[in-house]
Amino acid sequence: MLPATIVRALTTPAFEPDQFVATKWSTAEDKAKFANDLVKFVAQEFPRQSFSKALYQRLSNTFGHIAHYNRDGYYSVFFERDADKVVFLDQTLRWPCYGDPTYTFCDVECAVQRRLRAANVIDVAPTASLPRPRSKPRRRRLTCSRHDAENRPREKKMTEKARGARAPQRAGSSRRSRWAARIPALRAAFAPAGTPAL
């Protein structure tokens, strides 16, 4: 539970429409409502019932976030564990707020960031449970131990005859040799008129 002073610092004073610039698609009132809903959502410590469809749709398009398939997926990625909440706040605070306020919500992003920094929300968040940065997994080589372990039993059952070389193939039975035999005919068919055959 966040201390009452932080909750007050987050939610008061409420964002007003005159603080924001309207876009072609959203009014200044829409921007103010989103900003107030977001800081209230953070102040209440991310309750699921407050994570409305409208909040999800706008939040997934701001602060560099993505949709994560749907509202439930987004919520499970950022708000179910304390460590995820810290990751959300960190990403929200680090976002550089690109764009022009007449086309994007960058003015709302900046205002929300200022409010979160002033309230020191990230300092109160449980940082002990921060996840380690995820490293890229190494690609498995074809000769990894798992692959070898799967193939070992089959190797033991193979007979000496099976371990030997392949049976010889008929001349001209491989795919490569069949195509090689067709090359002169193809060259002749597609050669310009009057060109000598090779």
Image (tube, helix red, strand yellow):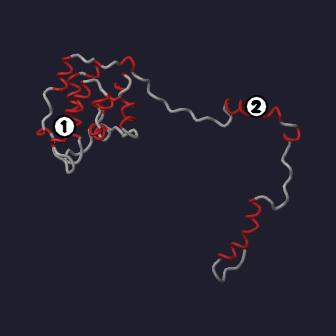
The residue located at (22%, 46%) in the rendering is: 100
Alpha carbon of mark 1 to alpha carbon of mark 2: how far? 64 Å
Locate the N terminus and report the quarter of the image it occupies: top left
User: Of circles 1 and 2, which is in front?
Assistant: 1
Residue type, mark 1 in image = Lys
> As drawn, which residue projects farthest toward the front?
49
Using the image, determine if residue 103 lies above or below residue 55. below
Relative to the observer, which residue lies in front, 118 or 60? 60
- Residue 157: give x, y in percent of width and height: 83, 34
Q: What residue type is labelled 2?
A: Arg
Near-viewer residue (96 or 14): 14
Q: How crowded is mark 1: few (under 14 residues within 10 Å), some or many (20 or more)?
A: some
Asked which secondary structure carries label 1, the reply is: helix
Say which quarter of the image contains residue 195. Answer: bottom right
Residue that badge 1 annotates: 33
Q: In which quarter of the image is residue 15?
A: top left
- Quadrant where the C terminus sits is bottom right
Residue placed at 67% from the left, 30% from the top? 146
Residue 180 in the image: above or below residue 194? above
Q: Find disc 2 in the rendering and name its residue.
A: 152
- Near mark 2 (Cα within 10 A), the count class, few <14, some 14-19 or many ≥20, is few
N-term mark: 1 or 2: 1
**Image vertical order of residue 138 relative to residue 124, above or below:** below
Residue 18 position in % (x across, y down): 11, 39
Residue shown at 84%/55% (left/top)?
A: 169
Q: How many labels, in total?
A: 2
160 relative to 126 in the view: left or right: right
